[in-house]
Amino acid sequence: MTNLAHGGSFLDKIGIPSHLAWGYLGVLIFMMGDGLELAWISPYLVDQGLSVQQAAFLTTAYGVTIAIAAWFSGVLVEAIGPRKTMLMGLVLYIIGHCLFVGLAIPKLNYALMIPTYALRGFGYPLFAYAFLVWITYRTPKHQLGTAVGWFWFVFTGGLSVLGSYFSSWSIQLFGHIQTLWFAIVWVLIGAFFALVVNRDKFEIKEQRDKTKAAFKFKELLNGITILKREPKVTIAGIVRIINQASQYAFPLFLPIYLADQGISTTVWLNIWGTIFVSNIAFNLIFGYVGDKFGWRNTVTWFGSVGCGVFTIMLFYTPAVFTGNVVLVSIIGILWGACLAGFVPLSALTPSLVGDGDKGAAMSILNLGAGLCVFVGPAIVTMFYGFVGTQGLIWILAGLYFVAAILTRVLKMPEEEIVNTEIKEKASPSV
């Protein structure tokens, strides 16, 4: 395939860096394996004898390791390289998955389920997010938004779509446990494409410390100290948390509200699935839009403001139009589309800092992606009893509007230089 630097290939023209194309395919297949049980593991375990609270805590432990791995994915790329980081994620996933499926579930050993499922949680952030950092280093800035859009397309397509579709077929033919074992097959195939067939070379153009150990420690520390040194990166991390907080909050209370409006849970699940088909498609569209309209503008107006407006409409539409499924579905589709408006944030954030800090900046952004899992449910837990559904909707919408304000601060260095020059020219000479 033609290297992106030379241009000309079909993949390059549609925004996929051709020298990383096999990596994109690998992430798609890996995430398909990782997402096999996403939609059904909790109710399955409850049917086997666990309580709802036990299943929820198991998922929480899994989320903790996802957040930790997401945080360190970027700095590990700079410390040991993307291939080793992705390989580390693969190994941890396979060990955790084999112990979870082979030993913990058959005996319903809850004490073993927690650490093994949590260990499995280290897998996909180290694998997928490390590849995202790889993309940010090896893609020209003018195409970075589109390249990132394609990443989220394959990431979400594998995790939320292909994994679920495969499971719905496999469970009927082979059962739940056998379906879980298929995950190993898919992640190995994905890793083969991303790590073996993908021949792209990754080099960090930076003067390293005298010893590799010192350099690695420096990069790991960089993932923490950047919060103080680069306040804009901290702001970007907050915006990233807000991005998907409602995605993890809505399923906890919105189906109950919609049922009161005449929309059954089954219908809601179909609406929810349609929302993410829309989201996947618009991950690509907003990658292109971001490169043309501006990354910051896209996140502000389409992502933040758009999500805020349609979040409010998700509450009022079924009430005003007495549970009209078509209208609620349209609003949901538009909300899912605007959720993809945050895609350019993955291109904007590393561009806020120098080359030596890109991995650390992406680590903070990836941490935000992991913390979404906690923040959304936490908001519901803290406020639902006091403000109800309507109040929660306004809280979540308000967070999106706050994100719009915060995003305006995320100006790239060249923008600040231009603004400074304009101000100097405009100021009266003494």
Image (cartoon, rainbow, N blue to C red):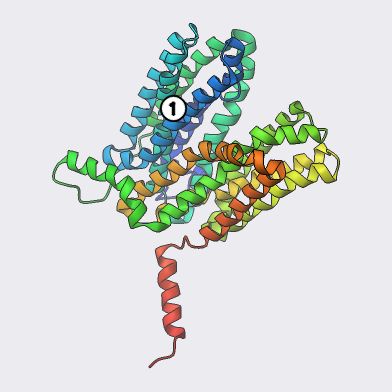
| Relative depth, front residue between 201 and 32 | 32
Q: Residue furthest bottom?
A: 430
Residue at figure coordinates x 42%, y 47% from the top left = 4
Classify the position of the C terminus by image quarter: bottom left
User: Hey, which residue is sitting farthest left in the picture?
Assistant: 210
Q: Is residue 286 visible?
A: yes
Q: On the image, which quarter does residue 116 sit in?
A: top left
Q: Read off the residue under disc 1.
A: 121
Q: Is residue 8 above or below residue 187?
A: below
In the image, is 335 to the left or to the right of 103? right
Q: Position of residue 347 (x, y in %)?
A: 46, 51
Q: Position of residue 47 (x, y in %)?
A: 62, 12
Task: Say few, some or many: other residues with alpha carbon within 10 Å of mark 1 (under 14 / 14 to 19 / 20 or more).
Answer: many
User: Residue type at mark 1?
Assistant: Gly
298, above or below 103, in the image: below
Query: Quadrant of residue 246 in the image?
Result: top right
In the image, residue 130 sits, relative to residue 350, either above or below, namely above
Residue ID at (68%, 46%): 391
Q: Is residue 161 above or below residue 366?
A: above
Judging depth in this view, the residue of 130 and 146 nearest the camera is 130
Q: State the SS at label 1.
A: loop
Q: x and y percent of residue 398 in the render?
A: 62, 53
In this view of the protein, can residue 36 be seen by the observer?
A: no
State which quarter of the image contains the N terminus: top left
Tell me where residue 275 appears, x and y as whole percent: 68, 38
